[in-house]
Amino acid sequence: MNLLSIVVPCFNEEETVEIFSKEINKTLNEHNFEIIFINDGSGDNTLNNIKKLADENSNIKYISFSRNFGKESAIYAGLKNATGDLVCVMDVDLQHPPSLLPEMIESVSNEDYDVAAARRTSRKGEPKIKSFFSHMFYKVFKRITKMDLVEGATDYRVMTRQVVDSILQLKEYNRFSKGLFQWVGFNTKWICYENVERVAGQTTWSYWGLIKYSIEGLVAFSTMPLTISILLGTIFSIVAFIYMIVIVIRYLLYSDPVQGFATIMCSLLLLGGIQLLSIGALGKYLEKTYIETKNRPIFIIKESNIDQN
């Protein structure tokens, strides 16, 4: 039977790792699998709890980072160290239902699919404002990147070894896994499920963190913000030129002096805001280029029970 490697990023999840392990063992008791926990610089007892599980179960592996590198780095580290013919990525808080795993494994093992991925069809239990902005993100992402990122798509998926190897070829430091999964292509089966609340603990995602993550995704897969800056600059330059001609004509024909302090101030503030927005967009791309050229490692392992090459 094919070995299934389950990659599980963890950050301050001391309350959930044992519950997750028990649920996976109950769901996959007839399958050959390993769990690879990635401790992403947790500040609680997450690592100790993982080590305890690893001592009791030979199929539980762990990698512990030297600090918090982020979920994207944790996913990459897990994929890089997974040895299974099939590889699964899922969250430890059980918001990714383990009950979907048998169908996902069946889809990539015996059907004509390379990936079986889960998507949420509802956001029950989430604040409405969070659901609204999530919906808008998918619409904007599709529009400016021309990539068909399925709304409600999650990182929860089972992939063949070929797909995983393709993703590992993408070695950029700034990673947006949902986009990378979509970018490599392959035949994907989408499996729908209702939103599930955390089994324990509190989420470490803040609204600000989600906004920054969304910006990272848009910048990683599109240069449209730069194009928008050029278009805005062109439009307002034309408008300003036409307005200048109107002022000259009015003065020559009617001796009408230039007036309108409030209009001038509003125009200056508007144009200044657009200029700062454009500079900010340009600066974001320069930031990404600057970070990539440093060629720093995506993660640093402090300790692990997996043999490192």
Image (spheres, rainbow, N blue to C red):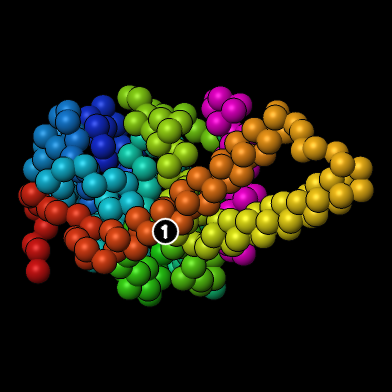
145 magenta-colored: yes
Residue in the image at 50% along x and 33% along y: 196
Residue in the image at 37% along x and 29% along y: 203
Q: Nearer the viewer, residue 76 or 211?
A: 211
**In the image, is 129 to the left or to the right of 242?**
left
Q: Which residue is mark 1?
A: 285
Instruction: Specify whether residue 54 is in view.
Output: no
* Dot 1 crowding, Cα within 10 Å, few <14, some 14–19, many 20+: some
Tell me which amino acid carries mark 1. Answer: Tyr
Residue in the image at 72% along x and 51% along y: 240
The picture quadrant where one finds residue 171 is: bottom left
Region in magenta: 125-151
Q: Does residue 44 lie above or below 162 as drawn?
A: above
**In the image, is 127 to the left or to the right of 78?**
right
The prevailing secondary structure element of the residues shown in magenta is helix
Residue situated furthest right in the rendering: 253
| Residue 215 picture location, percent across and down | 47, 48
Q: Quadrant of the C terminus?
A: bottom left
The picture quadrant where one finds residue 98 is: top left
| Residue 234 picture location, percent across and down | 67, 60
Q: Does residue 221 lie above or below 50 as drawn?
A: below
Q: Nearer the viewer, residue 77 or 275?
A: 275
Q: Quadrant of the N terminus?
A: bottom left
| Residue 168 picture location, percent across and down | 31, 69
132 magenta-colored: yes
**In the image, is 93 to the left or to the right of 270?**
left
